Image: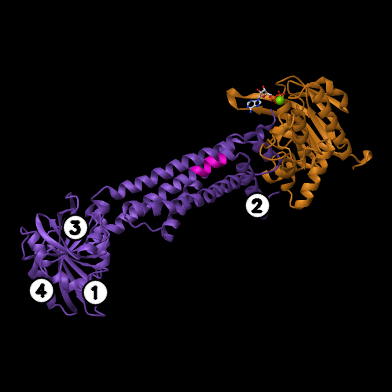
C-alpha cells in the first residue's frame, strides 16, 4: 500500500532513477544539456540586448535630474521632437514650489571625421552651460569653455568612427571640426554613451545650437526641464502646471519621461517584438529538444515501466522520475548557459559599445523561463506514461 | 517455510469468465476456468496459443478486474477489489515474463533492488545485500554490476527471476519464461526457477507450451478454449 508518506519516501528513488537514466546515455544527456544551454544563451542574449538597448535609449533621460519635463504632445522620442513656445515654459515659474527652469534643444547633424573626412550623424544637445540638471561626467570643469561661442564638447563614448578625438585634444588642446557645414571648435570631452538616436553625442551652448540649426525658431523649446524646491509635492505641482498650460503640451515626471522614451522604442519600432520573438524561439527550440529526450525515455521503456507498475509502483512514481529528469536538465543546462552568456555579455559590450549587465533580475528571469520550458516539456511527455499499462505485461 | 500439512491456498479460482470488448465485438476468452494452487507447488499451465493463458494470468496477478466467478489470491478476495488491495496483492507476487523487461540503464543488482525499494522496511544495506545474495543464488554473483547489455539472454532472464523473488513473494507467476531462450538455456532457467521456488517455499504458476520443461512440474494443467483441464 502506498500512503502519501510512502510516496514522499519514494522521491529520492525517483530522482536517482532519473539521474541514472540520463547518465547512462551520455551522448544523449549532453545533447539535452546543449539544448537547454542553447535556449538559455538565446534568452540571456535577447533580454540582454533588449535591456541594453532600452537602457541606452534612455541614457540622457536617466542622467538628467529635473523633476518635471515639458514637451509637445507630438514629440515621440529624443530624436523626433517638436518644439513648443518658450513662453509656455516660463509660465510654470508662477507655480509655487518651482525652483528653476531650463531648456534643452536637441537635433541631429553630420559630424565630419577630422581625420578621414567621412560624415557620421551626431546627436547635438544644446544646453545652458550653467544649468545643473545635467550631471554628465566631465561637464562640470568645462562649463566656462562651453559658454564661449562655437565650442563643442565631444562624448568620449561615441563610436570610434567619429575619429580619435581624445588623442587629437591631447595633442592640440582644441581643434576645428565641421558639423552640419559649420566650423566649430572641439574644446573638451564629456561622458555619456551612445543611444538609439545617434552613434555619437555633442554638447553645445544654446547660442551655438541655433547657429548650427538656423532653421529652428529661437522662440521654441524642445524640452523644458523644471526643478522643484526640496520637499515639494511633485504630483500636486505637476497638476497645477498641467492646468495652466495648453493641451498640446504634456507634463511628465522624471520616471514618466524615461518610460515614454522606452515606450516609443518598444511600441513604435519592432525592436521589443524582435527580441521577445527571439526569446520565444529559443524557448521553443529548447522545449522541443527536452520534450524529445523525456518522451523517448518513456517511449523506449514502456515494457519496463509497465513491469514496474505490475510489481506495485504507481503512475505517480514515474511522474516524479520525469519531473526529476526535467529538474536535472534545468540545472545542468542553465549553469553552462549562464557562464557562456556572462562572457558573451563582455564580448558584446566591447564590440558594440553598449552596456550589458548580467543583473540578478536577468538571471532570475532566464532561470524561470528555462525552468518553465523544461517543466512544460515534462508535462507534455508525462502523458505518454499512460501507455505503460500493467494490464499488458502478460501477452 | 510452510509445512506440507498446513499448506495454504495461494490461488483459488472458481468458474472464471472473461470477455474482451462488448456487444458485437465481444470475445469470450475464459469460459469457466477453475484452478487452485498451494504454497510449495510448482504448477505448469499449458495450452495452445490464444487459449486464454495470459488472460488468466493477468486476472490471477491482480492486474485486471475479474468479471464473473470467484477469485482469491494469497488470501485476498480480488473480485471487485479496489486499487489499494490490488496493489497489496501484487506486492505479494513475483512476475516473470517472456522478455526480461530489465531497465537497461541499471546494473543487475540495481534492477533487483528496484523491487525492494517499494518496501520501506528494507534499509539501503539490506536492499543491496539481499539483491546480491539472490543474484548469487541464480548464479550471477560475479555479474552484480553488469548492465543488461553486457549479459546473455539467459543471464538477463535469471536477473529477472532474481528481481521477482528478492522480496520473498508468496506466489510466482511466469508467462512463457523460456520462450525467448534456446532449449539448453530454457531448461537451465527453469531449473533455477524451480529450485528457488522449492527453497523459498512459495508457489509458482508457470505458463508454457515448451514440453521439455514439463518434467519440473508438480502438476500440469491444460487450458483449452478458456477451460482448464487437469
Ligand atoms: N487486450 C485484448 N483485447 C482484445 N482481445 C484480446 C486482448 N488480449 C487478448 N485477446 C484475445 O484473447 C484471446 C486469448 O488471448 P491470450 O490470453 O493472450 O491467449 P494466450 O496467452 O493463451 O495465447 C486471443 O484470441 C486474443 O486475441
Ligand atoms: Mg500468452
Query: Callout 2: helix, strand or loop?
Result: helix
Of circles 4 and 3, which is in front? 3
Tag 1 near tag 2, CB within 8 Å:
no
Along the viewing direction, whichever of B59 and A31 lies nearer the viewer: A31
What residue did someone put label 4 on? A91
> Up-down: is A198 above or below A189?
above
Residue in the foreground of this view, choosing between B87 and A194: A194
Q: CA distance from mark 1 to mark 3?
A: 30 Å
Q: Is mark 1 within 8 Å of ligand 1?
A: no
Placement of the C terminus of chain B among the 4 image quadrants = top right
Marks 1 and 4, Cα distance to the nearest angstrom?
Answer: 17 Å
Report how far apart the C-alphas of labels 2 and 3 lie in the structure: 61 Å
The overriding secondary structure of the stretch rendered in magenta is helix
Chain B as rendered: colour: orange
Estimate the spatial distance between the alpha carbons at disc 1 and disc 2, rounded to whole Å: 57 Å
Image quadrant of ligand 1?
top right
Query: Mark 3 falls within which chain?
Result: A
**Circle 1 sits on which residue?**
A234
Q: Is mark 2 within 8 Å of ligand 1?
A: no
Residue closest to the eye, B227 or A170: A170
Q: Position of residue B104 (x, y in %)?
A: 67, 36
Look at the numbered disc 4 and give the secondary structure of its residue: helix
Q: Is residue B167 visible?
A: no
For the residues beneath circles 4 and 2, the answer to whether they share a chain is yes
Q: Residue at x 11, y 61 (%)?
A: A83
- Is there one chain holding both mark 1 and mark 2? yes
Name the chain under label 2.
Answer: A
Looking at the image, residue B58 sits to the left or right of residue A51; the answer is right
- N-term-proximal mark, 1 vs 3: 3
What residue do we see at 24% from left, 49% from top?
A269
Residue that numbered label 3 is attached to: A123
Segment colored magenta: A28-34
Amino acid at each position: 500500500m502506498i500512503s502519501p508518506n510512502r510516496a514522499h519516501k519514494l522521491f529520492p528513488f525517483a530522482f536517482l532513477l532519473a539521474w541514472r537514466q540520463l547518465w547512462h546515455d551520455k551522448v544523449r544527456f549532453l545533447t539535452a544539456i546543449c539544448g537547454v544551454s542553447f535556449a538559455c544563451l538565446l534568452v540571456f542574449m535577447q533580454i540582454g540586448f533588449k535591456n541594453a538597448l532600452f537602457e541606452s535609449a534612455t541614457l540622457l533621460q536617466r542622467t538628467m535630474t529635473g523633476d518635471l519635463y515639458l514637451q509637445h504632445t507630438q514629440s515621440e522620442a529624443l530624436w523626433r521632437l517638436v518644439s513648443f513656445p518658450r513662453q509656455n515654459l516660463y509660465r510654470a515659474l508662477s507655480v509655487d514650489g518651482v525652483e528653476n527652469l531650463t531648456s534643452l534643444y536637441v537635433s541631429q547633424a553630420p559630424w565630419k571625421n577630422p581625420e578621414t573626412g567621412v560624415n557620421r550623424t551626431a546627436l547635438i544637445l544644446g544646453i545652458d552651460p550653467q544649468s545643473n540638471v545635467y550631471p554628465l561626467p566631465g561637464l562640470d570643469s568645462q562649463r566656462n569653455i562651453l559658454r564661449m561661442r562655437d565650442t563643442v564638447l565631444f562624448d568620449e563614448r561615441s563610436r570610434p568612427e567619429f575619429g580619435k578625438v581624445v588623442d587629437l585634444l591631447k595633442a592640440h588642446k582644441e581643434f576645428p571640426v565641421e558639423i552640419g557645414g559649420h566650423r566649430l571648435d572641439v574644446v573638451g570631452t564629456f561622458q555619456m554613451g551612445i543611444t538609439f538616436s545617434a552613434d555619437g553625442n555633442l554638447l553645445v551652448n544654446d547660442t551655438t545650437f541655433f547657429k548650427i540649426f538656423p532653421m529652428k525658431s529661437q522662440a521654441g523649446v524642445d524640452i523644458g526641464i523644471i526643478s522643484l524646491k526640496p520637499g515639494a509635492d511633485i504630483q500636486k505641482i505637476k497638476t497645477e502646471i498641467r492646468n495652466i498650460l495648453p493641451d498640446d503640451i504634456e507634463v511628465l515626471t522624471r520616471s514618466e519621461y524615461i518610460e515614454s522614451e522606452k515606450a516609443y522604442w518598444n511600441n513604435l519600432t519592432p525592436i521589443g517584438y524582435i527580441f521577445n520573438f527571439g526569446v520565444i524561439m529559443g524557448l521553443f527550440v529548447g522545449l522541443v529538444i527536452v520534450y524529445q529526450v523525456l518522451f523517448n525515455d518513456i517511449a523506449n521503456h514502456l515494457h519496463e515501466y509497465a513491469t514496474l507498475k505490475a510489481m506495485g509502483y504507481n503512475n505517480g512514481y514515474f511522474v516524479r522520475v520525469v519531473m526529476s529528469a526535467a529538474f536535472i536538465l534545468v540545472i545542468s543546462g542553465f549553469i553552462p548557459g549562464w557562464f557562456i552568456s556572462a562572457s558573451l555579455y563582455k564580448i558584446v559590450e566591447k564590440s558594440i559599445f553598449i552596456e550589458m549587465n548580467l543583473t540578478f533580475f536577468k538571471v532570475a528571469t532566464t532561470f524561470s523561463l528555462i525552468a518553465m520550458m523544461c517543466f512544460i516539456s515534462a508535462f507534455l511527455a508525462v502523458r505518454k506514461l499512460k501507455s505503460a499499462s500493467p494490464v499488458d505485461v502478460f501477452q | 517455510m510452510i509445512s506440507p500439512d498446513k499448506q495454504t491456498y495461494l490461488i483459488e479460482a472458481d468458474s472464471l469468465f472473461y470477455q474482451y470488448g462488448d456487444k458485437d465485438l465481444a470475445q469470450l476468452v475464459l469460459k469457466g476456468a477453475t484452478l487452485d494452487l498451494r504454497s510449495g507447488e510448482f504448477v505448469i499451465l499449458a495450452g495452445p496459443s490464444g487459449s486464454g493463458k495470459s488472460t488468466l494470468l493477468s486476472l490471477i496477478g491482480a492486474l485486471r478486474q475479474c468479471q464473473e466467478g470467484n477469485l482469491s489470491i494469497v488470501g485476498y478476495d480480488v473480485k471487485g477489489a479496489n486499487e489499494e488491495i490490488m496493489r497489496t496483492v501484487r506486492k505479494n507476487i513475483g512476475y516473470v515474463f517472456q522478455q526480461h523487461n530489465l531497465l537497461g540503464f541499471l546494473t543487475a543488482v540495481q534492477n533487483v533492488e528496484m523491487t525492494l525499494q517499494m518496501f520501506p522496511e528494507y534499509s539501503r544495506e539490506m536492499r543491496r545485500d539481499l539483491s546480491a545474495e539472490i543474484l548469487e543464488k541464480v548464479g550471477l554473483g560475479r555479474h552484480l554490476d553488469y548492465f543488461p547489455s553486457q549479459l546473455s539472454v539467459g543471464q538477463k532472464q535469471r536477473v529477472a527471476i532474481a528481481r521477482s523473488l528478492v522480496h520473498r513473494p508468496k506466489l510466482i507467476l511466469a508467462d512463457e519464461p523460456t520462450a525467448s531462450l534456446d532449449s539448453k538455456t530454457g531448461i537451465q532457467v527453469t531449473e533455477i526457477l524451480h529450485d528457488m521456488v522449492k527453497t523459498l517455499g512459495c508457489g509458482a504458476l508457470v505458463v508454457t507450451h515448451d514440453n521439455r520443461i514439463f518434467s519440473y512440474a508438480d502438476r500440469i494443467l491444460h487450458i483449452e478454449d478458456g477451460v482448464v483441464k487437469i
